[in-house]
Amino acid sequence: MSSNETYDVIVVGSGAAGAMAALRAKERGLSVLIVEKAHKYGGTSATSGGVLWVPDHQLTLNDDSREKTLEYLDSIMPGPIQRDRLDAYLDNAPEMARFMKSLGIPVGVAAWPDYYPQAASARADRSLICDTFDGRELGEHFPLMREQYNRFKVFGRYSMDVMQFFSISTRAKGWVITFLKMFFRYWTDFSTRKLTMRDRRFTMGAAMMGWLYKQVFDRKIEVRLDTKLDELIVSDRQVTGVRLSHYGRRYEIKASCGVVLCAGGFEWNQELRDRFFPVPGLTRHSSSPEDANRGEALIAGMQIGAATEHTESGWWIPTMQMPMPKASNFEEIHQAAFDVGRPHSVAVNRKGLRFVDEACGYDDFGKAMVADQLKTGANTPCWLVFDARFRDKFSAGGIMPTILMPDRKIPPDWWDRYLFRADTLEALAAKILVPVDTLKQTVANMNRYAGTGVDPEFGRGSNAYDQMFGDWNVKPNPCLGPIDKAPYYAVPINLGDLGTKGGLKADASARVLDGSGRPIPNLYAAGNNAGSPFGNCYPGAGGTIGPALTFGYVAANHIAACKVEQQQAGAGASHVDAAA
């Protein structure tokens, strides 16, 4: 069924890549439609940390440069990449960031070390973040934006920005005052409380998407929810539109200039995980929105001959699962990205052995889980083992510190299923089925390292990134504290992800390529719908969202330029006909 609708550009997916592609296309004078299969807009980006990795962004005075960025990337990227695509990212990312600023979006520098701080030309100023956004500025669209997960809220209610998160999660000096201010602001917001229990204060990824969609709606760009891509329409060997479904009704819309696929990865498709990943993991361990990114747009592209790349890996992050509050039959996923590297803890495989610098970047932690699983068959899940001091001060996935979640308040069905406790290491090892002598030796080693401040096995706490998430009250190494105060605890850590690194193979102009390396006319991809320009590498905080925004921007520019060429060619042909 055809709806007789035509747009210059149809954007599939409403995350960061889709929003940017739509905004830039509208800015270039094109008519745009965003289609989103979910009931809410914002995609995975709205639930993220909202950080953008944009090297040489030129938003502040510093000595970063394209050359220094390449020196850094060349020293850390494993395996082959498309060099021209990486060059396009480095050339266009700063321009994209300036475009955001020109729209009035408050993008600023976040003091976040690159994920390989010991590599050549690593820095701590390449990550950008958006200021907090007032969700009520979205008007009637406020309740329809995808909401942040409970992990980015206190008690599942009070939104935290990055600094508040670190203050409260580590119980840093002044953390109580920080929380009380959040509590007071929320409950004195009487007008919003009459409307919804949702916090109007959008932070992290919600802040970024709030700012972007304020611009989308101000420009009258239509966002069509509950609308799923079924197929791409191909005519005369070029993409000319899409077949969509909306509550069972199927219809077609024409795209006169291009279709931009920005519908995320395939992490919620177990069949594709089993097909592409060396250690597939389970869909339910993903920390992206549940059952959202199932790869429909990837499949639609492959059905018309599109090539893929980098599909063997995800954007890994350690996660743990826990029952939902007041609904114990249902579980939710909690990230443990920084918890696994806190002092007074150690991560071990099911043989009781360490396998990684626990405080490393979360993607590298996941890579280490994969490598250890392939080597030993005793990982995925692994165990985070910690003592009473850790329990008192830090979170372990969804298990909050004792001041917020004392043992006596933990439901009985959680014990020895989601959280394990014992008075001795021997008893804990027996509960989690880890060899007792091996676990005791591993903990003894960690206690010795805590005394010297040096981890000779993996170098935990030896670089700026590790130390950023440590506890500076612990000496001599903020990431190493003795594990010797009973009771002892353990939680299982899953091979989770933020999405998939691989997808449709796209070129430097974001055009999707076929199996012969030729662009499929009028088809573009950005975000996790496309392969990462970094291959199987995560260079710094925002290494997913930075390229997503950039290639959404690049795609819109290329489509606009193609339309101008077509118009000029048409005008030239008309002039020739008239002269004849």
Image: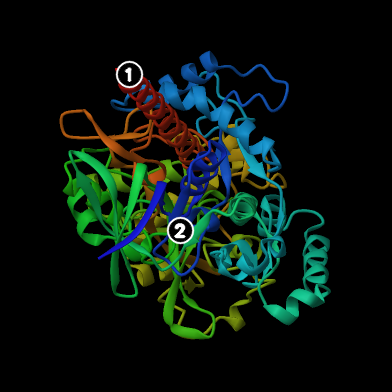
Q: Name the residue at 43% across, 54% down.
A: 318
Asked if one can make out residue 441 in the rendered structure from this viewpoint, the answer is: no
How dense is the environment of label 1, judged by Cα within 10 Å: few (below 14), some, or many (20 and up)? few
How dense is the environment of label 2, judged by Cα within 10 Å: few (below 14), some, or many (20 and up)? many
Give the mark nearer the N terminus: 2 vs 1. 2
Location of residue 244 in the rendering, given as x and y in whole percent from the top left corner: 31, 62
Of residues 398 and 56, the one drawn nearer to the viewer in this rendering: 56
Q: Indicate whether 367 appears above or below 485.
A: above
Location of residue 19 in the rendering, given as x and y in whole percent from the top left corner: 51, 48
Q: CA separation, marks 2 and 1?
A: 74 Å
Q: Indicate whether 352 appears above or below 407.
A: above
Q: Is residue 76 left or right of residue 514?
A: right
Q: Secondary structure at mark 1?
A: helix
Name the residue that disc number 2 marks.
384
Q: Amino acid at mark 2?
A: Leu
Q: Which picture quadrant has residue 54? A: top right
Q: Is residue 298 left or right of residue 559?
A: left
Please state, as top left, top right, bottom left or bottom right, where the C terminus lies in the image.
Answer: top left
Q: Name the residue at 41% across, 24% down.
A: 568
Q: Amino acid at mark 1?
A: Val
Name the residue that disc number 1 marks.
576
Asked if one can make out residue 88 in the rendered structure from this viewpoint, the answer is: yes
Location of residue 383 in the rendering, given as x and y in whole percent from the top left corner: 40, 59
Q: Which picture quadrant has residue 426? A: bottom left
